[in-house]
Image (cartoon, helix red, strand yellow):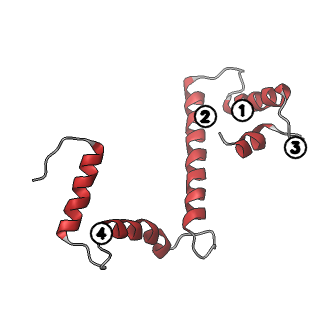
Amino acid sequence: MDRATLFERFDTDGDGRITRAEIDAAHAARFAAADADGDGLLNAEELQAMADARREARRAEQFERMIDRMDANEDGKLSAEELAARGETRMFDRLDANDDGVITQAEADAMRKMGRDHRGDGRRDR
């Protein structure tokens, strides 16, 4: 957890310090939110729902960071061109070893071999 997230999550009074009371309150609130039936206990379904919600929140953060990185026109959305540009351009540039604007079979084979050598998977060229 980075510093900003830590303070956003726990420094509820915004004083730049996190107290034990703030952490305890955050944990109690998280428990209460997960306790769907309000019985003061978490059953398997409630724990699964809590885990699913945390996983979805992390995925949402990843997508936000992805948009921040790739959104060339800064409209908060990714066009097909913006989405394709980053990955495809980088891959093309890596494969086009001599920068002639063309990927040859030899360049593709060399990149594949380099990947295998790097992974150390022991497969041989065929």
- Disc marking residue 10: none
Residue kind at label 2, given as amino acid type = Met
Say which label, 2 or 1, has the lower sequence index.
1
* Above-or-below relation of 55 to 40: below
The secondary structure type at the circle numbered 1 is helix
Cβ–Cβ under 8 Å for marks 4 and 3: no
Q: Which residue does the numbered mark 2 point to in the structure image? A: 50
Cβ–Cβ under 8 Å for marks 3 and 1: no
Question: Between 92 and 19, which is closer to the camera in this rendering?
Answer: 92
Say which label, 2 or 4, has the lower sequence index.
2
Q: Splitting the image into 4 quarters, where does residue 66 fall?
A: bottom right
Q: Residues within 10 Å of mark 3 (few under 14, many from 20)?
A: few
- Is 76 placed left or right of 84 in the picture? right
Q: Which residue does the numbered mark 3 point to in the structure image? A: 14
Is label 3 or label 1 in front? 3
Q: Position of residue 20 (x, y in %)?
A: 82, 25
Residue kind at label 1, given as amino acid type = Arg
Instruction: Say which residue appears at 61% left-offset and 34% top-offset.
Output: 50
Is label 4 or label 3 in front? 4
Q: Splitting the image into 4 quarters, where does residue 100 fall?
A: bottom left
Say which label, 4 or 3, has the lower sequence index.
3
- Disc marking residue 97: 4
Say which label, 3 or 1, has the lower sequence index.
3
- Disc marking residue 30: 1
Say which label, 1 or 4, has the lower sequence index.
1
Q: Label 2 to label 3, Cα distance in Å?
A: 26 Å
Q: Label 3 to label 1, Cα distance in Å?
A: 19 Å
Cβ–Cβ under 8 Å for marks 2 and 1: yes
